[in-house]
Amino acid sequence: MYVPIYVALCVFSIFTIMPQQLTEGGIKPLMDKSYDTLFDTIKNTKDPVREQRYLRAFLQKAQMENNLEEIVNGYKNYLHHSEERLRHTYADSMIYVARKSRDSALMGSAYLTKGFVFYGEKDHTSALDHYIMAYDYLKHTDDDYQKHKVQYMIGHIKYYLEYYSDAIRLFQDCIEYFKVHHTRGYLNSLHSLGLCHNRMGNYGLSSEVNALGLTEAKRLKNHSMDVYFNHSEGINHYFRENYTLAIETLEEAIPQIKDKGDFANESVGYFYLGRSHWTLGDPERAVAYFKKVDEIFTERDYLRPDLREGYELLIDHYGKLGNEEIQLKYIKQLLKADKLLGKTYRNVSGKVHYQYTTRELLQKESEMEAMQASHKNGNVRWGMVTGVVILFAVVMGYRRHRDKLKFKKLMQEINEGGPRPVKVVDLPPDELDISPGVVQDILKQLERFEEGRGFLKEDLTLAKLAASFSANTKYLSRVIAHYKGTGIVEYLNDLKIDHIIELLTHKKAYRNYNYEALAKEAGFSSVQRFVRAFKQSTGRSPSYFCRVLNKQEACQGGSSDALSNALPDT
């Protein structure tokens, strides 16, 4: 099979660059440990710095030993502990190395992992393609566990595409195998089978599967799936019109699902809670749950076709109340939801009944916006314009006053001599919820970074800085915000501007530099960013600052306050 050149180049660059980097920071001694020991540490440590060292050691050890299977596992480790945007890169690296091995089991495992990445992105078609490729390799092996793992995932794709009969056959085969060989896989397959029966309207069969799942969990002493069987049963109660029982069951299950971070099933639970309350004639409580579904959609971009009805009910509810503003809000949300559903579930058979079609929603949105616009007469519009003008004048006046005070303070600090005070927020480290050792390591590296003027490099970002520190980006961002009292961009800009102020103050030749040269000296990627950052930090432009310095020297010690007031604002 043809391997894209960009994948080969990506893997080659990782192979050539990593050996130089990974011997630093105590990586080499870790390579004497076994792969199992390294993997267990990666899996169990909560220290991101330690995690990165062991990830590197695992992959470096595999590369040095030319152990292709463990190199694949090394990339898989990185994939499971990386940001979403990097997962495709690591998955492609796995496939590249696996293909070099010509080992069918290894190639099947690599394609299966790539399928997981697509599945997590809800790209069901691409996921299915990779699962099928994985099975094509695995069918030539005796690795029955991996084969059934692929079948399980193909079953879920079939479920999402509404091919329920196909999914049921796959899950039943998985149940038969996993019952003997893998407890969690067995319970997962039972739960998935119950979901298929539910979606086909076989609520009795679904309930029987859920009951079997709970019984087997008790027998096997593995209760990891109990909450999901109960969640599924709560939805069965709704469809069997046992609304009170549905509410009781789902209210008990949802907090546990939320604790697991499973926002998808949390959203489904909220919808059927809302639908149960709506059917029982309690629209106020129903609306509260439909709004929770909307919150998850807004924050996570997640919605299932059957949950769409919640927006239709919200639109009708606020229409009856005469609240056009909120009604219009949910019309817009439903249009966004339809766009997402059309992309994510484009292959579904479309069995869900829609009260409002997209055309009807667009027409309703247009009518309501026109109605709202007609309510605003000329006096209201002029009043708004006047208010904006007054507000703008107040804001500009405040900014001029603030900038004048900021510049006055700067000149006082310069005239008093000594370094400018460093902005530090002295707060106890335990508020950060980060290991004190990690915090101290980051602070020491920041100190070296500032003393070595590392901030003068162009195009520095949080990711690049974290990479140079071998630190987690979230931890680095939180430490900077906590101890420096600012965000990463402002932190870097303030350091750059303080450097320029020092040069302009103590080395007169720099006052003859143009803005482009000063921007380059400070490591700004453009003149505009330099000038904007300088004004933000000092309250005035660089040229104004230079004129004040020159005027002070000409006056031989004149008052900086008088000089600041004598020169025009720029």
Image (cartoon, rainbow, N blue to C red):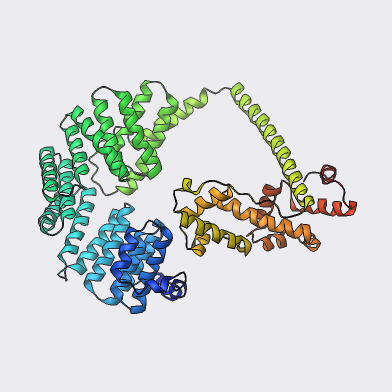
- Number of numbered markers: 0
The quarter holding residue 561 reads top right
Q: Is residue 239 above or below residue 551?
A: above
Q: Is residue 376 left or right of residue 388?
A: left
Q: Is residue 49 above or below residue 23?
A: above
Q: Is residue 156 visible?
A: yes
Q: Is residue 502 above or below residue 219?
A: below
Q: Residue at x 29, y 35 (%)?
A: 270
Residue in front for this viewpoint, 413 or 527: 413
Q: Is residue 12 left or right of residue 541?
A: left
Q: Residue at x 28, y 73 (%)?
A: 69
The location of residue 327, given as percent across then percent down, is 40, 28
Q: Is residue 457 visible?
A: no
The quarter holding residue 246 reads top left
What residue occupies the far right of the structure in this picture? 555
Q: Is residue 373 left or right of residue 88?
A: right
Q: Quadrant of the N terminus?
A: bottom left
Residue in front for this viewpoint, 356 or 297: 297
The location of residue 29, given as percent across then percent down, is 40, 73
The location of residue 332, given as percent across then percent down, is 41, 35
Residue in front for this viewpoint, 336 or 556: 556
The location of residue 507, given as percent across then percent down, is 78, 62
